[in-house]
């Protein structure tokens, strides 16, 4: 298989690229500039192509890959910026429509648990989407657009809703990098929320491996939660990081407010992902 990947220099993309290299796949990295393409390590071909201005036939420019893993998305981590709906969404639609018109047969796109909005409890792929962020709205509309195209275009779609990933390369404003920075500074305490919110966390390397597993499947995949399926409080998660590091650092609970754009308790169902991958 020849697999093209956009967003390979991003937090998730760099780990997906590593997982593809470990599978010895024929990879084409799609990068916005030649400098960015040169900075991405590993044995792969590179194509300089801007998703926002991909030309008439980006599919041909990418070498007509068997699979496109589409991770590129600008504007994060500002989830409420109108840029997601007003600028990013139209650009994504133009690019992916051109790929499908050109003959792309399998498309793998990362969605987000933010598509579910304020839904609480265990979330399955059948849970109605009611996004309350601009980012979630844009992603949900893109999914709807892609699924509508399938009535007239012959291509397979895998829409992978990412839950809470953490690990190397994450935005410095996220929980895990903030905690690691506090450890490196030797701080006596780590400021955080009350820590009682329940979430679904997954190491990014494991998520990347699972994403590649799905990308290499045959047949239309549809919507799949990419998650751990294991609810855990933020307090318990941070404590597990403290224990793993053998660190002497206190959790300064209640120093930061809870998020207004997320329910107090929600996590993903792993049932469909496990069924697709033959995991019991």
Image (cartoon, grey):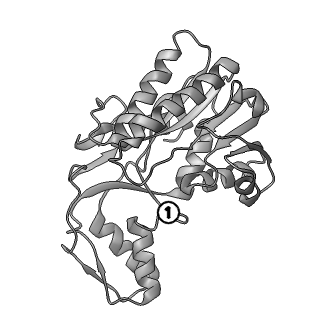
Question: Residue placed at 60% from the left, 30% from the top?
Answer: 95
Name the foreground residue: 143 vs 211: 143
The single residue placed furthest to the top in the displayed view is 152
Residue 15 in percent (x, y) is at 61, 56
- Tell me if mark 1 has few (under 14), some (14-19) or many (20+) residues whose alpha carbon lies within 10 angstroms of its own: some
Quadrant the N terminus occupies: top right
* Picture residue at 51% right of the left edge, 10% below the top: 151
Residue 247: percent from left, percent from top: 41, 86
Residue under the point 74% across and 31% down: 65
Q: Position of residue 174 (x, y in %)?
A: 40, 64
Q: Nearer the viewer, residue 279 or 107?
A: 107
Count the numbered circles shown: 1
Residue 231 percent location from the top left of the image: 31, 54
Left or right, 246 with respect to 214, comes to: left
Is 220 placed above or below 52 here? above
Residue 145 visible in the snapshot: yes
- Does the rendering let one see residue 219? no
Q: Is residue 272 toward the left or the right of residue 238 in the image?
A: right
In the figure, is residue 33 to the left or right of 75? right
Q: In the picture shown, does residue 75 fall above or below 205? A: above
Q: Hey, which quadrant is residue 270 in on the image?
A: top left
Residue located 81% across and 53% down the image: 43
> Which residue in the protein does label 1 denote?
170
180 relative position to 194: left or right: right
The secondary structure type at the circle numbered 1 is loop
Q: Nearer the viewer, residue 106 or 203?
A: 106
């Amino acid at each position: 298989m020849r697999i093209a990947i956009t967003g390979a220099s991003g937090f998730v993309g760099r780990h997906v690229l590593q997982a593809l290299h470990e599978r010895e796949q024929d990879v084409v990295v799609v990068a916005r500039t030649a400098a960015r393409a040169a900075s991405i390590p590993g044995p792969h071909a590179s194509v300089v192509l801007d998703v926002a201005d991909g030309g008439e036939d980006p599919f041909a420019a990418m070498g007509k890959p068997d699979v496109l893993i589409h991770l590129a998305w600008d504007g994060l981590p500002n989830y409420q910026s109108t840029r997601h709906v007003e600028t990013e969404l139209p650009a994504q639609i133009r690019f992916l429509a051109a790929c499908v018109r050109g003959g792309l047969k399998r498309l793998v796109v990362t969605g987000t648990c933010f598509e579910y909005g304020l839904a609480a409890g265990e979330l399955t792929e059948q849970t109605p989407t009611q996004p309350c962020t601009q980012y979630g709205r844009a992603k949900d509309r893109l999914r709807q657009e892609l699924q509508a195209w399938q009535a007239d275009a012959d291509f397979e779609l895998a829409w992978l809703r990412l839950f809470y990933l953490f690990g190397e390369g994450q935005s410095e404003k996220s929980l895990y990098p903030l905690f690691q920075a506090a450890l490196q500074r030797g701080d006596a305490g780590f400021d955080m929320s009350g820590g009682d919110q329940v979430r679904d966390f997954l190491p990014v390397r494991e998520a990347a491996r699972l994403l590649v597993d799905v990308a290499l499947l045959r047949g239309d995949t549809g919507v799949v939660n990419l998650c751990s399926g294991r609810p855990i409080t933020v307090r318990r998660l941070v404590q597990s990081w403290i224990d793993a590091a053998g660190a002497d650092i206190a959790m300064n609970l209640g120093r930061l407010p809870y998020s207004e754009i997320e329910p107090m308790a929600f996590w993903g169902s792993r049932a469909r992902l496990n069924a697709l991958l033959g995991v019991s």
